[in-house]
């Protein structure tokens, strides 16, 4: 299920992430499970989707990496109240237990952005400018390595916006893992 594919979205783009690894494509059963989890408020799917994330850790780009912290992509507080949970936080917690790596909500979404679904690549990137901030890192984390967790990526704009903020705060390396890519 986990594999490396080329991405036309990545061509010619400067990334602040070491890699983005997806467990599956956002289609078929995987896509339906994520929709039920995220929009259907079915938090009981977190263990199943978290297991898919753990399987993605077998990807050659991740298998030998050591992470200091796992960081979920945050939702704006209003969106989290609407959904009743942050799906990325539930996935990160599951993955953290498997890997024995602490989960830390280092990021905060400070601007309520329009949903990314339906926006093209340039509008997605515009939409996320100034959307995240990082709380002060303990000195033991500066220069460290973070595993960023989200449910879905399409253009990578959200993940890269998070990586920019983390790197500006002093994190040396940010790698992302998601359940599915669109």
Image (cartoon, rainbow, N blue to C red):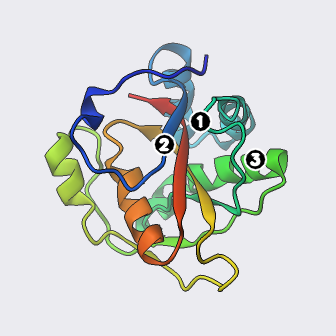
Q: Which class describes the residues within 10 Å of circle 2: few (<14), some (14-19), or many (20+)?
A: some
> Residue tagged by mark 1?
61
Local SS, label 2: loop
Placement of 139 over or under 52, stated as above or below: below
Which label belongs to residue 25?
Answer: none
Q: CA distance from mark 3 to mark 1?
A: 20 Å
Of callouts 2 and 1, which one flags the residue occurring earlier in the amino acid sequence? Answer: 2
Q: Residue at x 80, y 47 (%)?
A: 99
> Residue tagged by mark 2?
19
Q: Residue at x 84, y 54 (%)?
A: 100
Rendering coords of residue 130 (x, y %): 28, 72
Residue 39 visible: no
Q: Which class describes the residues within 10 Å of circle 1: few (<14), some (14-19), or many (20+)?
A: some
Placement of 158 over or under 142, stated as above or below: above
Local SS, label 3: helix
CB under 8 Å between discs 3 and 1: no
Local SS, label 1: loop
**Quarter of the image with the N terminus in it:** top right
Placement of 166 over or under 147, stated as above or below: below
Q: Given this view, does label 3 or label 1 mark the residue nearer the observer?
A: 1
CB under 8 Å between discs 3 and 2: no
Q: Residue at x 36, y 44 (%)?
A: 156
User: In the visual, does 116 lie left or right of 90?
Assistant: left
> Residue tagged by mark 3?
94
Occupied quadrant, residue 111:
bottom left
Nearer the observer, 172 or 46? 172
CB under 8 Å between discs 2 and 1: yes
Rendering coords of residue 108 (x, y %): 48, 72
Q: CA distance from mark 2 to mark 1?
A: 7 Å
Residue 24 visible: yes
Rendering coords of residue 30 (x, y %): 55, 21
């Amino acid at each position: 299920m986990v594999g490396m594919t080329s991405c036309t979205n990545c061509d010619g783009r400067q990334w602040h992430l070491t890699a983005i690894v997806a467990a599956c494509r956002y289609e078929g059963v995987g896509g339906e499970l994520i929709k039920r989890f995220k929009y259907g408020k079915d938090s009981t799917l977190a263990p199943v989707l978290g297991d898919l994330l753990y399987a993605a850790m077998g990807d050659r780009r991740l298998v030998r990496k050591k992470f200091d912290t796992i960081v979920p992509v945050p939702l704006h507080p209003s969106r989290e109240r609407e959904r009743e949970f942050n799906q990325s936080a539930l996935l990160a917690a599951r993955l953290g237990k498997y890997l024995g790596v602490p989960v830390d909500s280092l990021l905060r979404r400070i601007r309520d952005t329009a949903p990314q679904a339906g926006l093209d690549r340039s509008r997605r990137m515009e939409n996320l400018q100034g959307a995240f901030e990082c709380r002060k890192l303990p000195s033991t984390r500066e220069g460290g390595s973070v595993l960023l967790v989200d449910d879905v990526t399409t253009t990578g704009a959200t993940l890269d916006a998070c990586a920019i903020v983390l790197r500006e705060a002093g994190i040396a390396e940010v790698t992302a893992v998601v359940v599915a890519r669109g």
